[in-house]
Image (tube, rainbow, N blue to C red):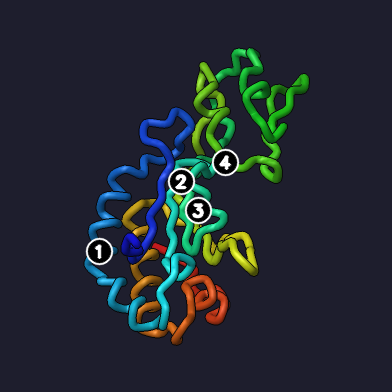
Amino acid sequence: MAKLPSYILDHCRDHCPKATKDWTGFYTQLEKEIQELNLKATLEERFQSFQFHHIPKIALAGCPNGCSRPQIKDIGVTGFMTPQLSGNDCSECQTCISVCQENAISWSEDGIAIDTQECISCGECIRSCPTERISAKESGWLLSLGGRLGRHPQFAKNVGQVRTGQEAKKWILSILQDYCNQGLTEERLSHYLERNKWVYEPSRS
């Protein structure tokens, strides 16, 4: 039987036109530093019979479409880009309305309006606007914890956001290091996070 990996680090496809953030450099740096943690030794000592569902699972997604499924991973990092209305003139093409899958953009005699409650910060309207009437207000990485499948499935919980891949990498590594040092016998990563009541909110810089 093939040996199990010590972690799974998934990502979405490279050069995707939907991506709001480039995950490629972030991924390379993160994988190198995860390997330096030597998770394999910790996991083989912690679990009497090391199984696939014990493996820490991490996903990087370039946008809220989440093709790498961060919603069901122990640790998820998802790119986002939040729109705003700039001072530029609107061409009244209404392309932004047609590309918005959340119906978060509307048109009236006053022009376009963005419903921030419905918007998921996918950035599609920003990319489609020919005059940059819709521009990026902010972009970064959304952070989530504790997703899993199996006997007791649950979606990951959103715990915050950071601006840079460097900040997200530091956040991920701190969680894995603490899990190595403080996790209980037979305790998988999502259960460890649940026991600690999702305390791993990102530090503000």
Residue located beneath label 4 in the image = 121
Q: Position of residue 124 (x, y in %)?
A: 55, 30
Q: Position of residue 48 (x, y in %)?
A: 41, 83
Q: Earlier in the sequence, mark 2 or mark 4?
A: 2
Residue located beneath label 3 in the image = 142
Q: Amino acid at mark 2?
A: Ala
Say which of marks 1 and 3 sits in front.
Answer: 1
For the point 48% across and 80% down, the residue is: 187
Residue located beneath label 1 in the image = 35
- Of 205 and 42, which appears nearest the observer? 42
Q: Position of residue 49 (x, y in %)?
A: 42, 78
Q: CA distance from mark 1 to mark 4?
A: 32 Å
Examine the rendered structure and indicate whether residue 38 appears above or below residue 130. Answer: below
Disc 1 and disc 4 in contact, CB within 8 angstroms? no
Say which of marks 3 and 2 sits in front.
Answer: 2
Residue 43 in which image quadrant = bottom left
Residue located beneath label 2 in the image = 61
Regarding mark 2 in the picture, which secondary structure is present there?
strand
Say which of marks 2 and 4 sits in front.
Answer: 2
Q: Earlier in the sequence, mark 3 or mark 2?
A: 2
- CA neighbours of label 1 inside 10 A, class few (<14), some (14 to 19), many (20+): few
Q: Amino acid at mark 3?
A: Leu
- CA neighbours of label 2 inside 10 A, class few (<14), some (14 to 19), many (20+): many
Q: Earlier in the sequence, mark 1 or mark 4?
A: 1
